């Protein structure tokens, strides 16, 4: 079986500021003008972007939120647990992975403005995911979470917020 280290090398993955490893796989050459986008976008954007994203036992996706919906695609490896904290103060956990019959999903849509964080399930070696966004991702779309503030707003998820907020 392939290893995380082999995937990092083969796909040219680099450490991601939110945690894990990534490489941009595609960026649409066409751009949308800022005036064609909702006001939440401060400037022009590519029509769409796609990345590879790898999580290992020593890494996880730190809590953050984005201006656009983000679609996660499960490609390879072990299941991943997502913590999702919506703007309406509701929270949930979702597992994406290969075992659809056990309730795992191969695709997850994270709605814009939702705080999200993810980690491998215990015992997992790695998970290779992909994400797609439209309009395309720009770094100013990324907002890092304040774990203490989120724990006050979503007390039922305090433990996971602490684990994914550091």
Image (cartoon, helix red, strand yellow):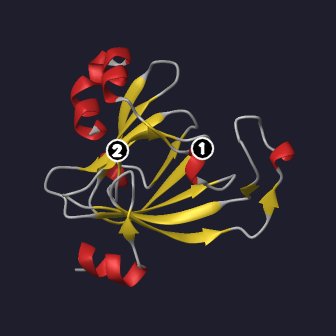
Mark 2 and mark 1 lie on one chain; the one further toward the N terminus is 2
Residue 38, disc: none
Which of 138/48 is in front?
138
Q: Residues within 10 Å of mark 1 (few under 14, many from 20)?
A: some
Q: Is residue 156 left or right of residue 48?
A: left
Answer with the quarter of the image where residue 15 lies: bottom left
Q: Please name the residue shown 38% across and 16% down the image.
A: 153
Q: How many marks?
A: 2
**Which residue in the structure is indicated by mark 1?**
69
Q: Quadrant of the C terminus?
A: top left
Element at label 1: loop
The residue lying at 58 percent from left, 45 percent from top is 141
Q: Position of residue 27 (x, y in %)?
A: 65, 68
- x and y, in percent, of residue 72 in the image: 48, 54
Residue 106, x across and y down, in percent = 43, 55
Nearest the viewer among 107 and 120 is 120
Q: For mark 2, does the 10 Å Cα neighbourhood hold few (<14), some (14 to 19), or many (20 or more) residues?
A: many
Q: Gap between marks 2 and 1, in whole Å?
A: 17 Å
Judge depth for marks 2 and 1 and give the one in front.
Answer: 2
Q: Position of residue 164 (x, y in %)?
A: 28, 39
**Direction from residue 135 to residue 83 in the image, left or right:** left
**Rendered residue at 71%/67% (across/down):** 28
Residue furthest to the right: 35
Left or right: 146 as drawn, with respect to 141:
left
* Residue under numbered circle 2: 62
In the picture, measured across the screen, residue 25 lies left or right of residue 37, that is left
């Amino acid at each position: 079986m392939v290893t995380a280290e082999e995937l990092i090398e083969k796909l040219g993955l680099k450490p991601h500021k939110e945690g894990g490893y990534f490489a941009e796989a595609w960026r649409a050459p066409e751009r949308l003008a800022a005036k064609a986008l909702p006001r939440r976008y401060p400037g022009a954007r590519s029509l769409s972007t796609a990345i590879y994203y790898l999580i290992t036992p020593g890494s996880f996706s730190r809590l953050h939120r984005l201006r656009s919906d983000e679609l996660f695609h499960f490609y390879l490896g072990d299941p991943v647990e997502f913590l999702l904290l919506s703007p309406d103060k509701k929270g949930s956990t979702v597992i994406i992975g290969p075992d659809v019959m056990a309730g795992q999903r191969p695709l997850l849509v994270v709605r814009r403005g939702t705080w999200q964080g993810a980690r491998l399930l215990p015992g997992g070696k790695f998970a290779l995911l992909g994400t797609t966004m439209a309009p395309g991702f720009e770094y100013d779309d990324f907002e890092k979470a304040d774990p203490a503030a989120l724990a006050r707003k979503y007390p039922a998820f305090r433990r996971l917020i602490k684990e994914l907020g550091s």
